[in-house]
Amino acid sequence: MARGGGGKLVLRIEDTDRERSTEENVSQILDALAWLELDWDEGPLSQHELADRHRDSLQRLLDAGLAYPDTATADDVRAYKEAHQGAGYRGPSEGVRGGVEGEGAGAAIRLRVPDQGETVVEDQIRGEIRFENRLQDDFVIARSDGSVLYNFAAAVDDAEMEISDVIRGDDHLSNTPRQLLVFAALGSEAPRYAHLPLLHGPDGKKLSKRHGAASVQELRELGYLPAAVRNYLALLGWGTQDDTTVMATDELVERFAIERVGRASAIFDEQKLRWINGRFMREQGLGHYEERLTAHLARTDPAAASDFAAATETKRAEACGIVREKAQTVTEVWPLIRFLFTEPPADPKAWQRVMKPSVAGPLARAGEVLAGVELWSTESIEAALRALLDSEDLKAGKLLQPIRVAITGTSVSPGIFESLAVLGREDSLRRIGAAVARLAESDGE
RNA sequence: GGCCCCGUGGUGUAACGGUUAGCACUCGAGGUUUUCAACCUCGCAGCACGGGUUCGACUCCCGUCGGGGCUACCA
């Protein structure tokens, strides 16, 4: 995590989705970084240049006798291991050492791992972790076709690009000694390491697509805010000493310390993310709120986006103003305010529950009262309707819910007085009138 | 099987060799209220287990159990 004051975090993208092409992986990651509002620069070396370094480094190790060609195939090794450390074999197992040295078609390159000593990983989170060299295979660093393998490429890239810190998932902890061995053979200095606990789904298994919100992209589609996601993510595996949970990103950067990150894997809890997101939604400035909504609609619902865009600036701002306290995610906003921008479809359930024949009278009188309101504002609308409530001796819900259903089509919406005010006198009266008419019709049946 | 990591309520976490083990989400009960949320109050619920070390362990050590990762000519 980059600290303030121009500190810079150097990331090397190494965890990629193998089902996709390199280009797709890269653009997906850059997309995610952009949405999370994180800046980035390109690395100092191109893909091509790195490939050259791989070749050079490989040759150097070969020349120095620190790596050697081996004609044993993956199947050979598997068979060997099964014979020597399968079930029933109780002796100490040893790392595989290639037997056949020598050129030949189909020879892969293995790194020569020392038989003695240990490779020690200094992890900023987990401390010192020791791995015995004799248990480590002489692992393959290049395929027989000359292409290099992950553990070798990762180490060479880190060395060439002078990576200072490697911060990655726990699942790479066992790869680290192998990479360290490559650094040692190369005579390069290794970066610092920090292995973060993994994130698991609600079932306790490694987080995957089937868990819903598995990627940053999905979080965006679900209507979460970048700042909320940053906050929530920081809280997984880490907590403040004074129990603060909701923090702006500045504060997060200020307080976060990698060495205070926990070691146990965490389970992704969307409910808490929702709660944090709700906090950020409510604290957002109106202008920002509208921008988010516009961007979200453009991406997910073009028809709604154009309905929204067609309204006046004032109306858009007012609409955002009356939902801001209600929506937990950006996705929830539009359903709550669409009635302001387009004719809402009537929700049969709400209609059935609320629009009893007996409400026809009061609803009609509410229409009359509203028609007589001089200044169409939240305050005067409320005053007028409360007066009607008194004279009719009705409980608030008895009248306000029917009005809500009449103008929004549903039983859930922002505050009713505000809703009427923003909708406007003309549309409000028309929808109330239509509802009264419809009630009269069904009454006659 | 081998190597490695991890284990505080349902979830995320805090603290400490000596506290009634704190906070947040969820859940439950009230309150507020024009709906739903939000908000306020109260509540349920935890140191995986067993041995040590110690005057005293959630905390340190060992073991067990449980979860995870690696064990590829994948990344």
Image (tube, coloured by chain):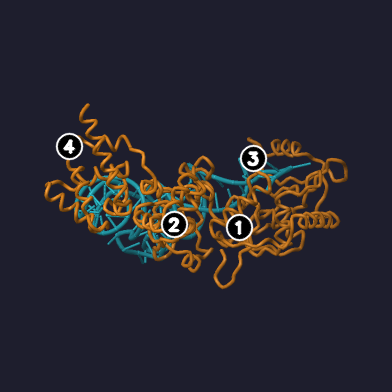
Identity of the residue drawn at 76% across and 57% down: A50
Q: Earlier in the sequence, mark 3 or mark 1?
A: 3
Q: Earlier in the sequence, mark 2 or mark 4?
A: 2
Q: Secondary structure at mark 4?
A: helix
- What label sits on residue A414 in the rendered view? none
Tell me which chain the residue with mark 3 is part of: A
Residue A96, compared with residue A321, is above or below; it is above
Which residue does the numbered mark 1 point to in the structure image? A129
Identity of the residue drawn at 74% across and 53% down: A115
Task: Please say whether residue A43 is visible from this viewpoint.
Answer: yes
Which residue does the numbered mark 2 point to in the structure image? A290
Which residue does the numbered mark 4 point to in the structure image? A358
As measured in the structure, the alpha-carbon distance from the residue carrying label 1 to the one carrying label 2 is 50 Å
What type is the residue that disc 1 sits on? Ile
Identity of the residue drawn at 39% across and 45% down: A342
Percent x, y of residue A229? 48, 55
As measured in the structure, the alpha-carbon distance from the residue carrying label 3 to the one carrying label 1 is 25 Å
Closest to the camera, between mark 2 and mark 3, is 2
Task: Please say whether residue A99 is visible from this viewpoint.
Answer: no
Q: Share a chain, discs 2 and 3?
A: yes
Closest to the camera, between mark 4 and mark 1, is 4
Front-most of residues A101 and A328: A328
Q: Share a chain, discs 2 and 4?
A: yes
